[in-house]
Amino acid sequence: MRDQPVVLAVASYASRATADSDFDSLWSSDSLSGSDHLTAALVEKGTSGELEINCHRSTATDLAWGIALLGGALTTVAAPLGVSYLASGLSSSAEWAGAAAIVGHFWNEIPRDKLRSMSNLLEAGQTGLVVVAIADDNEGLMTCLSGASSRVVSESMLVDLVSEFTRAAGTK
């Protein structure tokens, strides 16, 4: 495999309808159709004030990989939510090891102030999106998040997350 640009984006929305619209645009965008992997979660504050995943989607064909990619991002910016998501879908220690490699990559490669800004953005709002894109075109991602009232986006990181996941998970 080869190193590919990886982007983590967190967006906040004034309304659930606008967040739904941007979530839907991620999957219908021509500019993101060439993405190697795209995964996203629509996150809302529940009645208790804690973040909950309302819906999520991934282009990954390997279920564990898709869960690890989104769960790794969520764990990095909203730990309780991310760990719960990972626990709901990963079943082996090998899959957890792969997810840990992804969490470590995001934690070590994205500046802490940017991660704090992402976390604060999710906590401050009622509705948000968390998106991970492995794609050459960041402009397409930004266009899909056009309804956001605020967003924080990491710089593209060149890495082969698929190989990191499979190496850590001990799979081929």
Image (tube, rainbow, N blue to C red):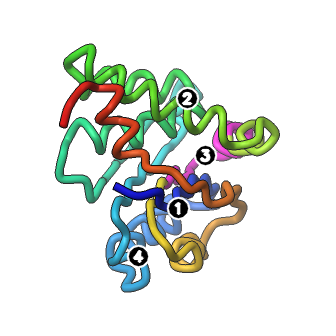
Number of residues whose C-alpha sits closer than 10 Å to that of mark 1, classed few (under 14), some (14–19) or many (20 or more): some
The stretch in magenta equals 119-131
Residue at position x 59%, y 28% in the image: 49
For the residue pair 54 and 146, the one nearer the viewer reads as 146
Q: Which residue is mark 3?
A: 126
Callout in the foreground (3, 1)? 1
Q: Quadrant of residue 69?
A: top left
Q: Earlier in the sequence, mark 2 or mark 4?
A: 4
Number of residues whose C-alpha sits closer than 10 Å to that of mark 4, classed few (under 14), some (14–19) or many (20 or more): many
For the residue pair 119 and 170, the one nearer the viewer reads as 170
Report how far apart the C-alphas of labels 1 and 2 lie in the structure.
17 Å
The answer to whether the residues at label 4 and label 3 have Cβ atoms under 8 Å apart is no
Q: Which residue is mark 2?
A: 104
Q: Earlier in the sequence, mark 3 or mark 1?
A: 1
Q: Which residue is mark 4?
A: 32
Residue at position x 52%, y 21% in the image: 80
Name the kind of residue labelled 1 in the image: Pro
Q: Is residue 124 visible?
A: no
Name the kind of residue labelled 4 in the image: Leu
Callout in the foreground (4, 1)? 1
Please state the horizontal and vertical placement of residue 118, each as a whole percent of the image. Answer: 69, 44
Q: Secondary structure at mark 1?
A: strand
Q: Is residue 126 above or below residue 123?
A: below
Residue 5's disc number = 1
Residue at position x 45%, y 68% in the image: 135
Q: Earlier in the sequence, mark 3 or mark 2?
A: 2
For the residue pair 164 and 24, the one nearer the viewer reads as 164
Callout in the foreground (4, 3)? 4
Please state the horizontal and vertical placement of residue 73, each as a whole percent of the image. Answer: 51, 39
Q: Is residue 170 rendered to the left or right of residue 147?
A: left
